[in-house]
Amino acid sequence: MGDDDRSTRSPVDERRRRLLAAAAAATFTGSAGCSVSLQDDSLEVDFGDGGSSADGGVDPPSGGDGGDGTDGAESATPNEETPSERAGGTPVVGTTTTVDSLNVLTASSAGSFTVLDQLYTWGTTLSPETQRFKPWAFESWQLTPGNIGGSSPTLTATLRDDLTFNDGQPVTAEDVKFTVEYIKRQQPSGSISGTTFAAVDTIDVDSPSGTTVNYYFGELDRDWFTTVLGAVILPKHVWSGIPDHTQFTPYEDGGDIVGSGPMVLEDFRTDRWFELSMRPSAAIPWNTAQGIDWLHEDGPFIDGLRIELFEDEQTLKQALADGEIDVADMTHSVDEALQATQQSHLDLVQTETDGYSHHSYNTRRVPMDDPAFRQWLVKLTDKTWLVDDLKNGIGARKGSYAAGYPFRAWRPPDPAQTGGSYEGIPIPDLSFPGEPGTFQLSDDDIADARAFLVNHPAAKHDYAFATARSSNVNAPDGKELYVNGQPFGDAHTDNDGNGGQGPLALLFNSPQENEDEARFAQRTIGTYNRVGLPIVGEVKSHNQMIPIAYASEDFDIFAMGWFTDVEQTHFKTLFGQWGADLTSSQGAMKFNAMAYTGADSLIQQNFQRMDPQARQPIVKRLLAQIYRDAPTNVIWHDRRLQPVNNRFAGWVNRVNGVVDKSTWLTVRRSD
């Protein structure tokens, strides 16, 4: 999935969306033919009384950053004013995404869930900055993977006992049970899918008015936290009277939406605006919950929320510049963000994103079948220049591992901090050989860069530099890379092993479609040429590149972007044999375009477990192995830039932006 899609997702999309690869991975889970063995252990998390928790992205009440040596998004720190001085006001959110439905089981647009996320409650949530698992409607749970297919529950969860629907009825375990059975029976096809509870065979409760829910799984489900446990909770006393979920049309039928979320919908015009009001503080108990440490404990402060729909992004940006709205639910370019900071009524919020941009290599072809050569390609990219020059010091982090920065609990230490290895996996020094931030190589730098490849102890091929035969190099000494005694263009093969393919080709989007990607690609090509590697650039649109990379695999290197999922299950499709077209069959849409299989054993181990505590060290080794083998060069991790009106303070730095229920439960007036 390319960068084009990153600004269109809603909070609920973040929970349920699958990057294109992870969607395919869900299919492979049941059909790959691999045997699944489970550890007979349990994961217990109890936030209600400070009990134990796993370290695999599941936090105890005190939180934690995963200890990988990286810093997180800037935290929103409450000021010292009294709540009464900050209370009141209605922030205005601008968006270009439409609201396709107010029925939570048929809605599929980002705009719909910008509204619906405020009206309903979900079982669990994620720390907005770190993406670590957190309680929400459920205050504790116990996972026992060894019970899959047995007579004992695989997952037992306990609801808070202080949640109510906005019509005054309590939220009980029976509502959760009803929701699971209703969705399994109705099989909705919106953002909430009928496959949400596919792994759940049955469910029971301690009593109809109780708080304990038991889930009996019939199969492995690594996404249990955000799907099964993190599902919406429907009020049984409303939805039990709706025989067909597609026929539920709130407001058109003369009734309001009944939910247990923090807000109620007061008025709206579907194509223009939505007015929501905040429920009484007593009905919004999350601010004081253990483990929910990013919300202001005295919140919420605002009276409500107004969501306005705009026809295009330019009009939306102008409304923000004119002070007509308080935040635009979209990202801004670096230049736009810097311009916004010049306006006295705007502050800039910079948040993490859950994806990365990359250059990926076709490992079917000589010499890209050699990890040593691929490491060399990575080494010759100046990522400091990208962050400091291209991004003006904001809007990006230097790339390293193939997982987003927010997932710090799952990432190994930064490559520079590993001491050359991690858990027995060699971590090569892939720092740029020239002066960082210049993208320039002196004659001595070129000699050092060449020596890295020529003298590589694990090189698969024999490398040397001799008189250039290609016109696509401009090395100061007139030399180019030779592979196994042949000039590069002769040694370079296609997918079928035929040599004589000439210079490498790097496919990238045009500056009009992705300016940063294009500028970085051009500088990279220039550096490769200067060190003696024949390579050319080919401009392709995003839509052109998809079939080239993922269907025909007719490429050497391509530039694109990926999202990574909270459960860290993207590896199987992006980096394993299960997602690779190893025979290069025409038309097979596979998302491991690189045909890399070097981490299959670790990927298999990761997919044989549900317990995050057991999976976390495997994922760290898996990321280290991929970094070492370099089938892809993670160029940068984007950071979302959002100018916000400074008449409000307390914006929560949520991954992918500030528009989320977390912000509306803590934001307050600053005037």
Image (cartoon, rainbow, N blue to C red):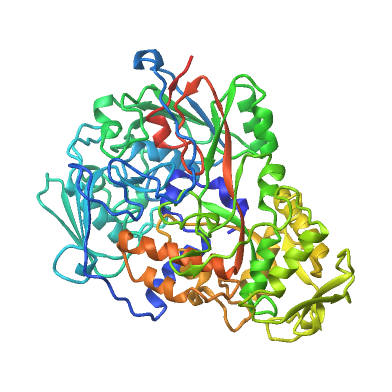
- Residue 232 in percent (x, y) is at 32, 47
Along the line of sight, the residue nearer the viewer: 44 or 268: 44
**Residue at the image point whose x is 60% and y is 72% from the top:** 594
- Is 423 rendered above or below residue 309? below
**Residue 470 shown left or right of residue 504 in the figure:** right
- Residue 661 in percent (x, y) is at 40, 36
**Residue 506 shown left or right of residue 2 in the figure:** right
Q: Residue furthest left?
A: 207
**Residue 562 shown left or right of residue 301 in the figure:** right
Along the line of sight, the residue nearer the viewer: 466 or 26: 466
- Residue 627 in percent (x, y) is at 55, 65
Numbered circles on residues, count:
0
**Residue at the image point whose x is 65% and y is 70% from the top:** 374
- Is 291 rendered above or below residue 555? above
**Residue at the image point whose x is 62% and y is 19% from the top:** 344
- Is 317 rendered above or below residue 28? above
Residue 314 makes an appearance in the image: yes
**Residue at the image point whose x is 44% and y is 42% from the top:** 129
Q: Quadrant of residue 222?
A: bottom left
Quadrant holding the N terminus: bottom right
Residue 555 makes an appearance in the image: no
Q: Quadrant of residue 90?
A: top left
- Is 486 rendered above or below residue 13? below
- Residue 310 in percent (x, y) is at 59, 34
